[in-house]
Image (cartoon, helix red, strand yellow):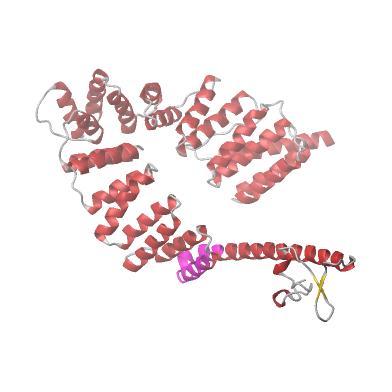
Amino acid sequence: MMGQTRHAGWAGVLSAFALILAAAPASALEFQTAEENQVLRPRVGDQILRYIEAEQEGLWLDAANGYTALLEEGRLQPFEEATVLQLRGRVFYELEQPLRAVEDWQRAIDLGALGVDADNTLRLNAGQLLIGEADYGGGTHMIETALALGAPLSADIAMRMAQAYGQMEDYASGLPFARQAFDLADNRRQNHYSLLLFYFENLGMEGDQLALIVDMVERWPEEKRYWSRWAALLGRQDRVEEAFNVNVIMYNNGLLSENDELIRLVQYYAFNGYPYRAADIMSREINSGRIEETPDHLRMLASYWRQAREWDRALPVLHRVATTTGFGPDYEALGEALYQRAEYAEAEVMFQQALEQGNIRRPGDTMTLIGNARYEQHDFVGAIDAFERALSWEYSRATAQGWIDFIERRIAIIRRGEELVHVTAIERCEIWLEAERRSVPTDETEFTDDNRRVFELPSECGTYFNRLGERLPDWQGFL
């Protein structure tokens, strides 16, 4: 009867496990449950079930802490450990900590206890998260490994792989995935055509470009852009109907020259996940004069460089905008870029300038950023002052108070550490003085006129004692 009870309990764990994993969005990550011959011991299964229930209630931190405690016990069998790592990785995913999720899933894979299918599912999940974090090489490697070990290729995975290889400008590797994303799609949308067209264009495959454009024109006859490119490729005239995808091809062939056409081109690149290409083109065309150097266009350029994490290139543009317009939001954007580059003193100045110029949508958040910049400079008192000012706005109050509490705790810890240093030093000096007092004076021993012994103190002890071995006033009663 006991064995039946335990088996039924584990069946419940599996059922709940499957339920919580199935709750993931269809477009997000997928998970595998255990194979039939893999079981958890009742003690472990009961704890896992408790943490799964916490997940169902949205208590993700409680679940993460529970799984961590299980792992730190060190008494899990390989399958149990792999299961817990798989579950904790999912919790980290829900907590928007993708790199910690990837780390857990990689550890689970390394244990080799879940089975090939489950390991492949984790590889696919981890690969997607790495791609989302701009680790395109790591992400594509994880997914390629899963595919090589038998994981099925879905249209969504093929799309992500093609986009990742496009970011790396590895068009030869990305083309097969772009084709598969196109072929596997149940309902082909314009983004499937756009991605494949992007690869054909970069690989110089004009015959394939033409065939695809014809298909696009047939599918979307109302889109002027496809007609325009079809006409250009066929050598026809004046079907001047631009489009984002077609503009990419026209630009590379020197067919785009107007400000609005070029703006649409860079917006296309950015919208489809290629901010670096968007910024590179826009910067070149602003310098050539074909895109007008207006504050709005410069803001757009800076935004693309920031999306591409090219802070060195974004900063001069942001500085030009801020000094040209004098607008508070422009100074705030400059400060945020400086903060990302760990130039905290300069960022603080820009945030303060933003507040002085005004028109800031959420000044409480800007004041919080000043506090963050001061904290990074170890100006704890100044940081607390900024956070206290941020308490004046309701929307920034909770964050500011959290920072105040955190810094005050850190200051207290630092002070306790400093006190411990002094206590230890004074105790060492007391021991040294006691030993010296008990020693027999020599001919070189010095005494005062009233026959009190004078000590040659170690340099450390001179901070706390005078030469007569008496505690200095500042340190009276310290111990």
Query: Farthest residue toward the front?
Result: 443
52 relative to 356, above or below: above
Do we see residue 315 in this rendering?
A: yes
46 relative to 351, above or below: above
User: In x, y percent, where is residue 182?
Assistant: 36, 25
Which residue occupies the foreground of this view, 300 or 382? 382
At 76% from the left and 66% from the top, the residue drawn is 457
Rendering quarter of residue 277:
top left
Which residue occupies the foreground of this view, 181 or 405? 405
User: In x, y percent, where is residue 470?
Assistant: 78, 75
Quadrant location, the N terminus: top right
Side (left or right) of 364 relative to 201: right
Overall secondary structure of the magenta section: helix
125 relative to 399, above or below: above
Q: Is residue 386 magenta?
A: yes
Q: Is residue 101 magenta?
A: no
237 relative to 304, above or below: above
Side (left or right) of 218 relative to 156: left
Side (left or right) of 67 relative to 94: right
Side (left or right) of 246 relative to 373: left
Do we see residue 358 in this rendering?
A: no
Provide the residue span drawn in magenta. Answer: 382-403
Which residue occupies the foreground of this view, 339 or 89? 339
User: In x, y percent, where is residue 384?
Assistant: 53, 67
Rendering quarter of residue 165:
top left
Query: Farthest residue toward the left?
Result: 237
User: In x, y percent, where is residue 102?
Assistant: 56, 37
Which residue occupies the foreground of this view, 28 or 421? 421
At 70% from the left and 38% from the top, the residue drawn is 12
At 73% from the left and 39% from the top, the residue drawn is 45
Quadrant location, the C terminus: bottom right
